[in-house]
Image: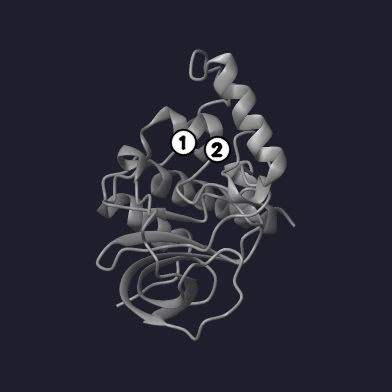
Amino acid sequence: MFRTFTVDSLESFFYRNDIPVQPARQLYPARRTLVRSGVFGTRQLIALLLSCIVCHSAYPCYVPTGALENDPAELIANTPEIRLALAIAEQKLPEQNSATAGSPGRYSFRVIETLKGSAASEIALTGDLDKAGLWDTSFNDHQDTEFWISRSGRLGNTGDCRTTPAPEFVLGQQYLLFIGGPDDSKKFERIDNSQDQWLKFVAAHLLYEFRGDQSGSTRE
């Protein structure tokens, strides 16, 4: 069974899961800059910089440009489809010249909730079946401050600091899928339960925006 969220169904979602209804901005802490010191010694840092100059695309992004860390509210507004879905199957695709996928494949999902966009019971996304470097974290139900301060999700960045790698998923796990819209490292976050802070933020923001749209239409 699946639903498309409206104002009424969003309010029902909050009620069913015992989530207080409040403007989404109250759930989102202000962004701060993290300063990390003592991680590298001088010689190690010089060696790292030289190696990045020689072959920058082979190394992870150590100095993000912000291109993949969109403001959460802007990411929601600019994404046409947002769905909570369960990964149920994967299928290997013919080998292609993919710069981001070691083993190109297709993941199938059963839609649990459609928060934004047209209703669908199942969807499919292309991704990487090579899970050797998989980081399938939920950021402690997205309570970790690292997720909110850096605005960076589980996808991370490729070596160019401007694109995300092909997504990887674990069968049997739930994900909040942002389909279409800007590239962002938060597009496919793992969701373990209905109290997850990222899920609550997205649903609250949509409810807040829907209410605003309705009141504006009424005034007109």
Where the C terminus falls, by quadrant? bottom right
Q: For residue 10, what is the image quadrant?
A: bottom left
- Name the secondary structure under disc 1: helix
Q: Residue furthest bottom?
A: 94
| Residue 166 appears left or right of 199 | right
- Name the secondary structure under disc 2: loop
The front one of 183 and 54 is 54
- What residue is drawn where x is 47% and y is 84%? 93
Does 49 sit above or below residue 90? above
Alpha carbon distance from label 2 to label 1: 5 Å
* Disc 2 and disc 1 in contact, CB within 8 angstroms: yes
Marking on residue 151: 2
- What residue is drawn where x is 40% and y is 70%? 129
Does 136 sit above or below residue 150? below
The amino acid marked with disc number 2 is Arg
Query: Residue 152 location, x and y as percent?
Result: 53, 41
Q: For residue 114, what is the image quadrant?
A: bottom left
> Is residue 38 visible to us here?
yes
Q: Crowdedness of circle 2 by 10 Å Cα count: few (<14), some, many (20+)?
A: some
| Residue 162 appears left or right of 96 | right
- What residue is drawn where x is 67% and y is 47%? 55
Marking on residue 74: none
